[in-house]
Image (cartoon, helix red, strand yellow):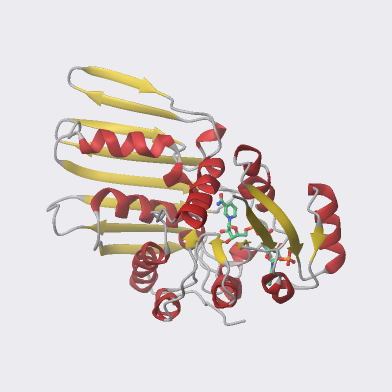
Amino acid sequence: MTLRLGLLGAARITPAAVIYAADAVPEVSFTAVAARDHARAEAFAQEHAIPSVAENYAALIARDDVDAVYIALPASHHLGWVDAALAAGKAVLCEKPLSGNAPALRSLLQKGYGPMLMEAMHYVYHPLWARVEEILRFGTLGTLTELAMHFSVPHIPPGDIRREFHTAGGALLDLGIYGVHMFRRLLGDPLTVASANAQGVIDQVDERFRGVLTHAAHPGLTATVTASMSPEDPLAAWLSLRGSEGSLQVQNPVAPQLGHELTLTRKDGELRESVDPTPSYCYQLQAFADAVLRGKRPPTDGADALATAVVLDALYEKAGLPPRPALER
Ligand SMILES: NC(=O)c1ccc[n+]([C@@H]2O[C@H](COP(=O)([O-])OP(=O)(O)OC[C@H]3O[C@@H](n4cnc5c(N)ncnc54)[C@H](OP(=O)(O)O)[C@@H]3O)[C@@H](O)[C@H]2O)c1
């Protein structure tokens, strides 16, 4: 069985997220790429040995030799093309965030499309994350008291899709989404916003964001997400979990292939581990193939993305900022 993938957009992330990842997932092949600019699509196809170029996004979706599409566009543009692809009977792997806001995603899910829809929250599929959840499941940390996740990526230039409101920019939506998703995975739904603060806001776009979440089933616990695309903050990604019996620090839970470390500290000692240098994208693509070809439901489906979007919208609202746009085609 082969899964024939079409690439919607010639995005920067596409080679790492799916093209190189497919080396590890031989049942995935690529049929065609489409970009707004045909010449750019041609150049992308040549560079990455994609056999053909579709005239535009709609033409890509309409092709009989495309079983599924990978969508990597500005967050504002995801949902319109997800809708079109699902309506055409194609399975979809869409970059995070699946939608600029929750209500638009809720409306899409209510249409009840049949094909598989998966949000590309790749970290979940890596064995490092399975190890984090295993440590928690065994009660190794005791009663959880404090969770924190930080993700900062400096040098995002002016004009980047992450810095424009109309392309659903913002540090929370682009980077903080990982922390919110991790907290949801570890604590379950619903999370409640205790406080939220956006800094460096230009045209409604947050350069830095700090949000504190709580959960009714964990009295006294706080879960703090911080995200930054300020040039003053160094590149960093970490997760910290504290409990009554110990703590767990995870360096780089987002892209473990770039180096990661897990440190478990308890009264009886400290344990340092690294798990697997394989890119998270390889595991994600295998999960997508398993979902489409074998009906194995992925943990980051549309409903999961909606639950995350609800929290992100609430954080923006608490910080006095509007939800991000989710455009129709
Ligand atoms: N999973 C991860 O690790 C990861 C990492 C980075 C990014 N991402 C996600 O992937 C998506 C794309 O990110 P990227 O960094 O790859 O973006 P990008 O290359 O800057 O843009 C992606 C595509 O969006 C289209 N585009 C760019 N600017 C646009 C505009 N102003 N209006 C309309 N369309 C525009 C272009 O499509 P054409 O090629 O058709 O012109 C471009 O190829 C985002 O949702 C981001 O959050 C995920």
Asked whether 46 or 246 is in front, the reply is 46
Position in image of residue 184 (x %, y %): 30, 55
Q: Quadrant of residue 26?
A: top right
**Vertical arrangement, residue 326 with respect to residue 205, above or below:** below
Asked whether 252 or 277 is in front, the reply is 277
Ligand 1 image-quadrant field = bottom right
**Vertical arrangement, residue 312 with respect to residue 106, above or below:** above
Q: Quadrant of residue 188?
A: bottom left
Q: Is residue 301 left or right of residue 269?
A: right
Position in image of residue 108 (x %, y %): 45, 78
* Residue that sits furthest to the front in the current view: 1
Identify the residue at image location x=23%, y=17%. 269
Q: Is residue 209 left or right of residue 207?
A: left
Say whether residue 295 is visible: yes
**Vertical arrangement, residue 9 with respect to residue 268, above or below:** below
Position in image of residue 109 (x %, y %): 41, 75
Identify the residue at image location x=28%, y=48%. 186
Asked whether 309 or 155 is in front, the reply is 309
Identify the residue at image location x=44%, y=44%. 125
Q: Is residue 111 left or right of residue 137?
A: right
